[in-house]
Amino acid sequence: MFIDFLLQVFSDNRDKEAIIWRDQAFSYEWLSKRVRYWLNEIEKSEIESGHVVMIEADFSPESVAIFLALTELGGIVVPLTKSVEAKKDEFIETAMGQWLLQVDVDDNASCQRLSGNPEHKCYAQLRNQGNPGLVLFSSGTTGKSKAAVHDLAKLLEKFKTPRHALRGISFLLYDHIGGVNTLLYMLANGGCIVTLENRQPDYVLSAIERHSVELLPTSPTFINLILLSEAYRRYDISCLKTVTYGTEPMPESTLLRFNSLFPHIRLLQTYGLSELGILRSKSKESSSLWMKIGGEGFDTRIVDNMLEIKAHSAMLGYLNAPSPFTEDGWFITGDMVETDGEYIKVLGRKSEIINVGGQKVYPAEVESVLQTISGVAEAEVFGEPNALLGHVVCAKIRVADGIELDKKLLKRTIKRLCSEKLQSFQIPAKITFDQGEQFSARFKKQRNIG
Amino acid sequence: MQRAALLAIVESVVDELNELKSEQEKIQFSEDTSLYGQSSPLDSVDLVNLLLAVEEQLEDEHDISFTIANEKAMSMRNSPFKTVSTLIDYLMSELN
């Protein structure tokens, strides 16, 4: 019932490739059969509609088939990936999981019963309507991960509008709203999902070349890594037509550099949240951070320079936090934006603004300048308390490989180059060097909140 | 620490700040140079940068870890950040 429209697409495209896994192609006919196999297996098992099922997996033929079968049977699906290994027990406890379905690296599935006894008003709402659910955990960079409960039947609605069939990389993770969005988009349009064994720039670009990939949905951090690694010199990625980026502010310098190297690739900014799903968006140009967002099922408004969104497909609520919605259903995103007519530009999270003597500094703006400086591989900007100004701007720099480090000289160069492009209060007052990578398993910049 | 050594640190830090300034904005260095207030060539961001750079040199070259703009300094009746000379007096008394 819930996935009928997908099964129709599968049958219309039966000979086409649905999933590439370990360089092996699996057709829509295969996927269709496999979904039916799992429907049958699950029906024979003790798993019932409304049960909370953790699926520990990465994108693979079986994990996709199982996800769809559970959806069809009205299960409440909680995807988990290796990236949250350390929080697995916490997530199982928060979700009150009843079953743990594991799909191992060789794509073999196994199932065990858990002790969860899931009672929550969000779960009750799903069960009353007989709808399948999806629980997604926020990355929790600024505290505890929040568990957002979605009505999967509602989330599927927007994929019923036919769009282009594309060959795309499943870069964003299986347990992330962006990853789920990529998966459903591809399947709903008879596209092909090219799965990854790792997320190293060289490996990803070689997969793009080998499998004629047209779409890479990714994050600004990964685009920066492609540029740094110069992996693009080693592979022919002329097949790539579109790169989408979201999840964090894009440094303008990174965008412009990628755009000048690949003028034929369309760069599209996306906007989405675990709580709301992914909005439709349109960048003004490939080289522009300005975008229009919204689309069917989403209303947007800006209150005190902050973006608020009302979504038809919004989550029902959190399992472990109070409802973040206003009384009339608006979600306060925490993202500060600038507007120009219909277009908006995301400046950064309100919580990340550094207040220097009453002046606001957005880390992304400073990072964008720092990343243009030769010798700088990555830059993380954050605030630190200061008795005179409230806060000062600090920068942690990862120096590019193979650069001989004269700290003093590099600091002076950084300050001089920053002074050409930034106001004095925006220039990092403290600069430190650290060779550790500055991004999370979700390829998102990690910032200290000062 | 010797007064002369501290003076040398502050002077080198002022030189660094001057690298980022236009000809008209450059800070003339002397013991009487005012660091704060109307008559000062430094604005509050300059002052903070100056203090942080002095802290950094103390740490890097003399292995002294000290936050100059601390609660005590901020609440002193005679602000230690009035001139180069008062800053050095303050550092002498705190560090020695």
Image (cartoon, rainbow, N blue to C red):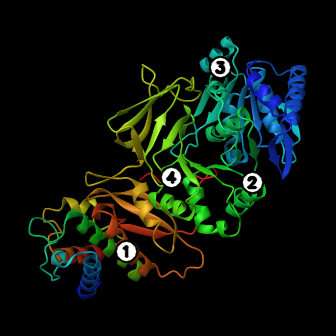
Q: Numbered disc 2: what chain?
A: A
The disc at residue A212 is 2
Secondary structure beneath dot 1 equals helix
Identify whether A122 is placed above or below A280.
above
Q: Numbered disc 4: what chain?
A: A
Query: Which residue carries the number 1 mark?
Result: B56
Q: CA distance from mark 1 to mark 2?
A: 52 Å
Q: Quadrant of the N terminus of chain A?
A: top right
Provide residue A413's location: percent of width, then percent of height. 39, 77
Q: Amino acid at mark 4?
A: Ser
The disc at residue A123 is 3
Q: Numbered disc 1: what chain?
A: B
Q: Closer to us: mark 3 or mark 4? A: 4
In depth, the one of A102 and A208 nearer the eye is A208
Same chain check for tags 4 and 1:
no
Provide residue A36's location: percent of width, then percent of height. 87, 26
Q: Amino acid at mark 3?
A: Tyr
Q: Amino acid at mark 2?
A: Ser
